[in-house]
Image (cartoon, rainbow, N blue to C red):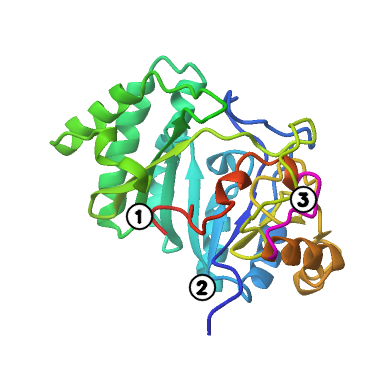
C-alpha cells in the first residue's frame, strides 16, 4: 500500500562545518539529535514513508552516532537519502559504503565555491572517487550545482565550468550545461546524476511578500523534522516557524491531524499560501502553475 509521504526529512543535527553564502543558517540552539530520539521518530515515520532524508539544516556527516542512526534505519526497513557538502567524506567513507540502509548520497557542489574553499579540486576529487565505490554497492549518487542565476539573484557560479570539466575528465567525456537544457538533471553514468538549479531565496519573515497565490509540496510529498523533534511542513523552514508539534510530546498522527496542518494542506490544494512565511518563500514560487521540481535521482 502506498504511504502518505514520498520522503520525510530528518535533521539529525543543525550544526554545519561550513558557512555557505546561500544558506541562511539557523538561530536555533546548536542541537544533535540523540540516537534514542531518532529511533522513536523513525518508528513513527515508517508508517508514512519508506524513505528518510538526513537533511534540512546542518551537515549529517558531523553526527557522532551516524553509525547507530543508519543501523536504526536498517532495523526499521527505512532507506536513507543523505545530503552533504562532501568535505568530511574521507572520515565517513567506510561507514557509508558498509551501510545497508543508504540509498542515495547527494553532494552540494555549490558549497565549494560558496565558502571560498581554495582546495576545492581535492574535495571534488574525493567525491568523484566515492561515487565509483558507492555505485558498485548499489548506492545512487547525485552531484548538485544549485547556484545558477535566477531572475532576481545572481549565484556564485564562476567555478562551474571548471567543476564540469573536472567531472568530464573523470568520466572520460565532455559534460556541458548546454546538454542539460530545461531538464534540470541528467544521467551522467549508471546511478550517477547531475542536477542543476537556480539559486533561490529561503523563506524568511524579512523577505518581500510574494502574494497569496502559491503551491508547495509540504505536507503532500514530504514533511520535515528538526533536530529537537519539531515537525514542520517543509524542508526549508530553517527556524521552525511553522511548527506543527513536537514528537517528544505528541505522536506524529496527532500532529499531522492538527488544524494548522490541515489549513496549510487545503490552502495549497487551492493554490493559496495560508501562512505568512510561505508567501515569502522564493523556492515555492517556482511551483506556481506547474507540477514538477522533484529531485532528479528519486
Q: What is the C-alpha distance between the residues marked 1 and 2?
A: 18 Å
Residue depicted at 60% across the width and 25% down the height: 19
Q: Residue 118: horizontal and vertical position, in percent? A: 41, 14
Q: Is residue 175 above or below residue 140?
A: above
For the question of whether residue 228 can be seen, the reply is yes
* Magenta stretch in the rendered image: 270-277
Task: Give the side of residue 168 with respect to residue 238, left or right.
Answer: left
Q: Sequence order check: which comes first, mark 2 or mark 3?
A: 2
Q: Main secondary structure of the magenta part?
A: loop
Task: Give the side of residue 268 with respect to residue 128, left or right.
Answer: right
Q: Secondary structure at mark 1?
A: strand
Residue that mark 2 sits on: 77
Q: Is residue 88 above or below residue 155?
A: below
Within the magenta stretch, is there residue 219? no
Say which of 125 and 93 sits in front: 125
Q: Nearer the viewer, mark 1 or mark 2?
A: 1
Residue depicted at 57% across the width and 77% down the height: 3
Task: Place residue 13 in its image quadrant.
Answer: top right
For the question of whether residue 87 can be seen, the reply is no
Amino acid at each position: 500500500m502506498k504511504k502518505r509521504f514520498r520522503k520525510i526529512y530528518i535533521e539529525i543535527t543543525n550544526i554545519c562545518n561550513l558557512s555557505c553564502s546561500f544558506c541562511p543558517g539557523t538561530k536555533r540552539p546548536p542541537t544533535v539529535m540523540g540516537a534514542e530520539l531518532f529511533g522513536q521518530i523513525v518508528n513513527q515515520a515508517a508508517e508514512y514513508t519508506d524513505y528518510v532524508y538526513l537533511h534540512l539544516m546542518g551537515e549529517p556527516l558531523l553526527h557522532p552516532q551516524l553509525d547507530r542512526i543508519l543501523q536504526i534505519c536498517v532495523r526499521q526497513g527505512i532507506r536513507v537519502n543523505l545530503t552533504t557538502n562532501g568535505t568530511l567524506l574521507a572520515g565517513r567513507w567506510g561507514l557509508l559504503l558498509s551501510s545497508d540502509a543508504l540509498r542515495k548520497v547527494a553532494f552540494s557542489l555549490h558549497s565549494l565555491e560558496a565558502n571560498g574553499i581554495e582546495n576545492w579540486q581535492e574535495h571534488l576529487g574525493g567525491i568523484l572517487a566515492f561515487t565509483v565505490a558507492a555505485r558498485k554497492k548499489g548506492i545512487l549518487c547525485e552531484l548538485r550545482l544549485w547556484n545558477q542565476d535566477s531572475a532576481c539573484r545572481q549565484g556564485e557560479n564562476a567555478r562551474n565550468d571548471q567543476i564540469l570539466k573536472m567531472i568530464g575528465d573523470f568520466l572520460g567525456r565532455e559534460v556541458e550545461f548546454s546538454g542539460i537544457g530545461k531538464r534540470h538533471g541528467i544521467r551522467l553514468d549508471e546511478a550517477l546524476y547531475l542536477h542543476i538549479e537556480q539559486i533561490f531565496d529561503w523563506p524568511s519573515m524579512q523577505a518581500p511578500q510574494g502574494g497569496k497565490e502559491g503551491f508547495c509540496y509540504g505536507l503532500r510529498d514530504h514533511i520535515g523534522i528538526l533536530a529537537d523533534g519539531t515537525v514542520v511542513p517543509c524542508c526549508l523552514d530553517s527556524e521552525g516557524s511553522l511548527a506543527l508539534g513536537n514528537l517528544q510530546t505528541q505522536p506524529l498522527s496527532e500532529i499531522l491531524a492538527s488544524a494548522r496542518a490541515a489549513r496549510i494542506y487545503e490552502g495549497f490544494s487551492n493554490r493559496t499560501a495560508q501562512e505568512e512565511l510561505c508567501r515569502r518563500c522564493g523556492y515555492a514560487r517556482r511551483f506556481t502553475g506547474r507540477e514538477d521540481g522533484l529531485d532528479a535521482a528519486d
